[in-house]
Amino acid sequence: MTDQQYMELALEAAAKGAPNTWKNPLVGAVVVKNDQVLAIGYHHHYGQPHAERDAISQLSKKQLFNSTLYVTLEPCNHTGKQPPCSDLIVASGIKRVVIAQEDPHQIVAGKGIKKLRDHGIQVELGVLEQAARRLNQHYNFFYTHKRPWVCLKKAVSYDQQLGYLGQRTQITNQAAYDCVHQERSRYQAILVGSTTAIIDNPSLLTTANTDFPPIRIVLDRRGRLLQHLKIKVLTDGLAPTWIFTENDNFLKVSLPDFVKIHKTNGDSIQAVIKTLTEQELQSLYVEGGRRVAQSFLQAGLADEVLTYVSPEILGDGIPAWQENKNDYQYHFSALADNFRIAGYKHV
């Protein structure tokens, strides 16, 4: 087998960690010796051993001696929730390390590679790099651009309506619903405006099995939720809820511990992005209505657009917001009788 084929095994293993690595990247590792795969490991869960440690722990010192390690992301060289993987690799007797991509996190960035080379280990970088980067798109974007990746999602009728004014409108089918729930699990925060929170009363949860459900964010500049304190995101306790508001009265109300109030003065969109960045949350899934989406577009903070199109015609409804399609590359997929259109901004 080739280096590329062994790295493909590592990438397949890495994907198994989703969605429980949370702020940590998905990483896979494969140990090979004499053209035989001796161990495959991956990062299973946030706070647990990294992929390199998972693979190396399966083998004896004799098996590891003069072997090759394939890993999808540069080994760390610092102590966090786990000790440095670079030290473990050096101590193991591995003679060659093949890495898909350098870690963009400033605490790692090149330091793990340098440590290995300084100890006489042969390091090769860039094998299936683009595939590795796609695997951790949000992580890579966050530590490169110093802000979270923002995805705008909308569901529209065939005549480009979002729904009927003042009432919850079911537009898409079960296949689209299931797809959205899986998408939510790939994001660390989900955002809606106060109108969506009040009219639709969504839980903003995911059906995916994860220990780290996305943080639910509601933009409520005026404090409209103060008249709707029984909605799900303020009562169910199933995930954290953050409210961004200019209304001081929120600070006078007794709310459950899982609800956190963020006072803003002015642009709530920038306040959200600033807070998420400070908390090292790498991705935001925006499910708000027309005004919320347009605010992100006008601020230049839409990196991806997802549109679900139903064959239904609503007629007199709320017109959908429109992005500048020249900024995006589109692809399509069918979901039963609905269509999913994804747009990726050039960055």
Image (cartoon, rainbow, N blue to C red):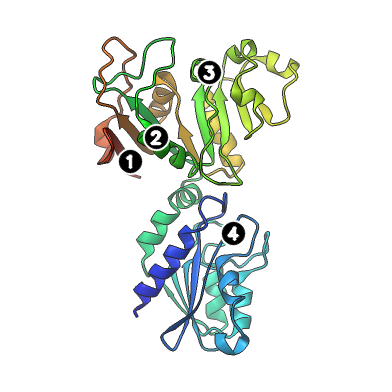
Q: Is residue 70 left or right of residue 235?
A: left
Q: Nearer the viewer, residue 264 or 155?
A: 155
Amino acid tagged 1: Lys
Of marks 3 and 1, the one in the foreground: 3
At a point 41% along the width and 86% down the height, the residue shown is: 35
Q: Are marks 2 and 4 in contact (CB under 8 Å)?
A: no
Mark 1–mark 2 Cα distance, whole angstroms, equals 8 Å
Q: Position of residue 200 (x, y in %)?
A: 49, 19
Write down the residue under mark 4: 107
Q: Are marks 4 and 3 in contact (CB under 8 Å)?
A: no
* Up-down relation of residue 96 to residue 296 (above or below): below
Query: In the rendered image, which quarter is residue 77 located in?
Result: bottom right
Q: Quadrant of the C terminus?
A: top left
At a point 59% along the width and 73% down the height, the residue shown is: 86
Mark 2–mark 3 Cα distance, whole angstroms, equals 20 Å
Mark 3–mark 1 Cα distance, whole angstroms, equals 27 Å
* Up-down relation of residue 173 to residue 20 (above or below): above
Of marks 2 and 3, the one in the foreground: 3
- Res. 120 mark: none
Amino acid tagged 4: Ile
**N-term-proximal mark, 4 vs 1:** 4
Amino acid tagged 3: Ser
At a point 66% along the width and 31% down the height, the residue shown is: 237
Q: Are marks 1 and 2 in contact (CB under 8 Å)?
A: yes
Write down the residue under mark 2: 302
Amino acid tagged 2: Ala
- Res. 345 mark: 1
